[in-house]
Amino acid sequence: MSGPIDYPPRSMRFDLSALGMLNERPREIFRHIVESYLAYGEPVGSRHLSRLLPMALSPASVRNVMQDLEELGLIYAPHTSAGRLPTELGLRFFVDAMLEIGDIGAEERDKIEAQIKASSQDQTLETMLSDAMTTLSGLTRSAGVVVTTKENARLKHIEFVRLDPERALAVLVASDGSVENRIVPLPRGLPASALVDAGNYLNARISGRTLAQAKAAIEETREIAETELGELTARLVDAGFASWVDVAGQGQQLIVRGQANLLENLTALEELERIRLLLSDLETQKEVIDLLSRAEGGEGVRIFIGSENNLFSLSGSSMIAAPFHDSHRHIVGVLGVIGPTRLNYSRIVPMVDYTSKLVGRVVQGR
């Protein structure tokens, strides 16, 4: 797989030096406990482990090693079970030090590429991202999430349509084909021709520019607008452009797809309760956006596990996410998947990485 795998900052990672005492035996036992959890979500006991290990160890010897791992905080015994599960700390250690990242499979690669290619033809960026997340969520059996900002969109056209003597509809079009409609107030006594004049004036200055660039251009020519257009029409120019600022000023937009996948293959009522909490978390858009934005800090894939972030402190969930860039290498969004902590990290990481790169290419092409 191309591209680095970037995990949370060092302050969020386990101090690997504290695990220097782990030799081959405890590492192998720990690996089997984690891999069994990721595959089945079930605790694994010493007797079962003794049959799986490549070295000959009695169940009693395995139990002694498990006790050491438990004292390190890497595994725990749920309820009164004789088996063990990895803690969030254990999962972080596994991901940082032991996870082997594979490459994306040919079938998965083809599905992601075909969907993005199809939806990028004559579709808005939002539609393309939505379709990409639907495909990614289906392949990973998790919830696909993406956050992107409207402020980076290139503006294309603005038009005013009078609704009544006091209001007009500002039709705002971006170069990616997305359309926003906003009602703006009309100055009293504004002539009908002023709507066309205001639209022409704005289109001459905003077309092909980002919001920040267009805003600067409009502010630079504010005095010229009053001279060329008159005070009332200049006021409409301000109101119309402000309506675009209001739209883009909403900042980042969140798209979530495939939440129903989270309800599949649950093995216990406890898991159902955790997924219920996760679905509730996903309804809290600001926190999800804030979490995704933290993945902007690196070039590659970021992995967040459980209570490393406040959003998942109750549901015990994980997120695998990667940013995508425009043609100037500016980050314009982050996409990924959210699901239980027993995600198949080695399989999902390359899928998220590949999807982010394909989406980036589409964005750069626009």
Image (spheres, rainbow, N blue to C red):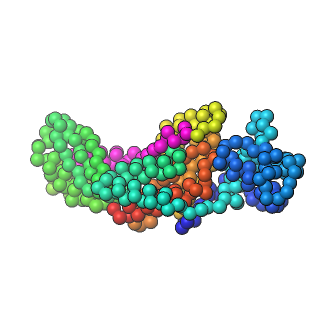
Q: Is residue 257 magenta?
A: yes
Q: How many marks?
A: 0
Say which of 318 and 16 sits in front.
318
Q: Is residue 252 magenta?
A: yes
Q: Which residues are magenta?
A: 236-264
Is residue 211 something that shows in the picture?
A: no
Q: Residue at x 25, y 59 (%)?
A: 207
Say which of 17 and 229 sits in front.
17
Assign the C terminus to one quadrant of the image: bottom left
Q: Residue at x 77, y 53 (%)?
A: 52
* Residue 274 coordinates in the image, percent (x, y): 61, 36
Q: Residue at x 53, y 35 (%)?
A: 280
In the displayed structure image, the side of residue 171 where residue 34 appears, left or right: right
* Residue 131 coordinates in the image, percent (x, y): 40, 50
In the displayed structure image, the side of residue 34 where residue 232 appears, left or right: left
* Residue 75 coordinates in the image, percent (x, y): 76, 46
- Looking at the image, the residue that sits furthest to the front is 51
* Residue 23 coordinates in the image, percent (x, y): 82, 61
Is residue 49 something that shows in the picture?
A: yes
Assign the N terminus to one quadrant of the image: bottom right
As drawn, 18 above or below 169: below
